[in-house]
Image (cartoon, rainbow, N blue to C red):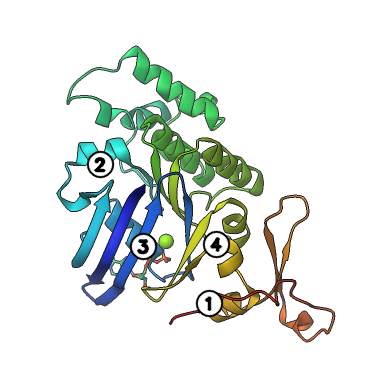
Amino acid sequence: MTRLQLQNVSFSYPCGRMLHDISLHVRDGEFVGLIGPNGSGKSTLLKLIYRALRPECGEILLDGEDLLKMPFRKSALKMAVVGQENEIPFDFSVEEIVAMGRSPHKKLFDSDTEEDHRMVHHALEHLGIEDLAKRNYRHLSGGEKQRVLISRAIAQESDFLILDEPTNHLDISYQMQIFDFIKRLNVTVLSAIHDLNMAALYCDRLYVIEKGHLVLEGTPEEVLTPGNIRRIYGVESSVSRHPATGKLSIAFLPASVQASPMIQNTNQNKVEREYVS
Ligand code: ADP
Ligand code: MG
């Protein structure tokens, strides 16, 4: 079943066209990554999906229904979002922020139920931040804020997560912990990810966006080849399959070793997906 479908979606900022004729889909249960250089339009594309921006043309379907006409409460029950900017302009405690995730489940001015409290604490516990519950959100570190917002998405209990570089401010242990945790939730995920090794470890399928165009789609094996990495990022790499994870592992090569005859790309003999810029 297709959860999300974008058909020929375009978007312009006042300074000009940013996204060009984007078509993509996310199937039920898939973990789909959106990768591409800085400024290529990943956050803009996700903002169209969580309706912080409105497409200029094209169609977005969520569970087969026109997302642009769907009441916000209904889409919030289906889809939770962790955006890239994590500033909140007022003083709220961590607990209050996470409790906001419960609002689509309630009517305006309904007070919190036992179930709401349980879900909030369950979410805080899962992200290892119960001890932050009473703290002022604005006084937290970037990594702590990121975990609070992921907790809020978990407390929302929707089975489709839209994430914009969710582990950006986190050190490697939390990065792994959060992706492992999200993976275990067995929900559908569409996430912008800037770390290609993380994308290789966790994603079933990847889309590559470059200068507002989708240029490539496929499994990590199809997309993350040294040739594609060179074309997209201008960086040489060596890609191998890690014996422990069975997933691709990418080593980036500094200019000083690029000329070395020792470097061999292990998937050189694979057919690379055609790059369509
Ligand atoms: P990414 O998430 O891939 O790094 P973004 O979607 O954030 O890229 O940005 C894509 C481009 O759009 C960038 O050049 C950025 O400067 C521009 N941009 C982002 N937000 C705005 C805005 N509100 N107004 C004008 N341009 C913007
Ligand atoms: Mg971004």
- Distance in Å between CA atoms under marks 4 and 1: 16 Å
Q: CA distance from mark 3 to mark 1?
A: 19 Å
Mark positioned earlier in the residue sequence (1 or 2): 2
Residue 104, percent from left and from top: 26, 31
Q: Residue furthest front?
A: 1
Question: The residue under label 2 is which amino acid type?
Answer: Ser
Q: Nearer the viewer, mark 4 or mark 1?
A: 4
Residue 90 tag number: none
Residue ID for mark 1? 232
Screen quadrant of the C terminus: bottom left
Image x and y of residue 259, in percent: 78, 87
Which residue is label 4 attached to?
A: 219
Q: Could you tell me which secondary element the residue under label 3 belongs to?
A: strand
* Residue at the image position 27 percent from the left and 27 percent from the top: 105
Secondary structure category for the residue under label 4: loop
Q: Earlier in the sequence, mark 3 or mark 1?
A: 3
The structure residue drawn at horizontal position 50% and vertical position 61%, both measured from the top left corner, is 206
What residue is disc 2 on? 75
